[in-house]
Amino acid sequence: MTAKHHLELTQVGIDFPTPKGPFTALTDVNLKIQKGEFISLIGHSGCGKSTVLNIIAGLHKATKGGVILDGHEVNEPGPERAVVFQNHSLLPWLTAYKNVELAVKQTSKGRSKAEMRDWVEHNLELVHMSHAVDKLPAEISGGMKQRVGIARALAMEPKVLLMDEPFGALDALTRAHLQDSIMEIHADLGNTVVMITHDVDEAVLLSDRIVMMTNGPSATIGEILDIELQRPRDRLALADNPQYNHYRHEVLTFLYEKQRKVESVAEHRKKAQGKTKANDASVA
Ligand SMILES: Nc1ncnc2c1ncn2[C@@H]1O[C@H](COP(=O)(O)OP(=O)(O)O)[C@@H](O)[C@H]1O
Ligand SMILES: [Mg+2]
């Protein structure tokens, strides 16, 4: 096993069958991730970010190419690749504690009862949820539910933590708290993380590299930006950091110039006028 090729996506492409024939969502996605790296995937809605994550998770099978984790091809979901979704997906009839415990049981590490309790509690503590272990999902806030979802994923001791817009549904303050927690946990545990986000600040704050995807169909990696900001990172200090703002600008330029998705009102008007003229001409 070489640290260089911890997680490797090679020539990944996928065609989805549709009534109109195959739809090529991704082509030629190549990415080598090192152990412990924090990677963000960013790109416009519908470009294929979740599809990439789901292929790494083993939930979708690539039509072309494939994924290798520590020398083994990924063919199906497994506990070494835990996923956190935007909507917590906790079982509503189980307490926070029981939700985490259920996931740990699936990893079958042969823990004693006492070891199990310690481990579940430890992971809930990591996400600052020790005070609410016996609460049901309906009894806690959205941010707390995401914390439990993260604890559940971490408790499986994954080699890779996959997160699909994990903070996307939260208000800005709650999101900031959870980002700080994720940075702490990443510093402590050193998991490899692949996180999807559409938040440019979040991507720059958290990542070692930002992987920017082109628009689909046949989406692929457009650019990769190395974020060489010292850790631990502090959001307040970074607000006036020129390097931070440079990275931010790079991502914004990629998204809103190079991969612009929505035409401006002025452009739309221009096109519409062009069409009217063409129509007029054809009538004349
Ligand atoms: N199971 C599927 N069948 C057909 N098309 C799909 C399927 N899953 C995703 N797609 C299409 O693939 C593209 C990428 O989707 P997705 O990965 O969800 O985008 P993102 O997460 O970047 O918003 C979209 O055009 C979407 O409609
Ligand atoms: Mg998505």
Image (cartoon, helix red, strand yellow):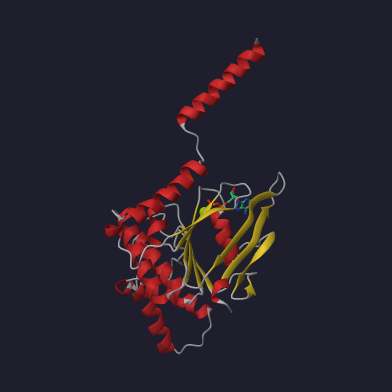
Q: Residue 176: name its quadrant.
A: bottom left
Which residue shows up at 42% across the image and 68% down it? 150
- Location of the N terminus by quadrant is bottom right
Q: How many marks?
A: 0
Which residue shows up at 41% across the image and 82% down it? 119
- Kindly tell me whether residue 84 is visible in this rendering: no
Measured as percent of width and height from the top left, residue 88 is found at: 44, 62
Judged left or right of residue 22, residue 130 is left
Task: Say above or below: 152 vs 273.
Answer: below
Measured as percent of width and height from the top left, residue 234 is found at: 30, 62
Residue that lies at the very extreme toward the right in this rendered image: 21
Query: Which one is in front, 163 or 137?
Result: 163
Task: Say above or below: 105 vs 239.
Answer: below
Measured as percent of width and height from the top left, residue 170 is found at: 37, 55
Residue that lies at the very extreme toward the top in this rendered image: 284
Measured as percent of width and height from the top left, residue 189 is found at: 41, 76
Judged left or right of residue 122, residue 266 is right
Judged left or right of residue 7, residue 196 is left
- Location of the C terminus by quadrant is top right
Judged left or right of residue 32, residue 266 is left
Which residue shows up at 35% across the image and 74% down it? 126
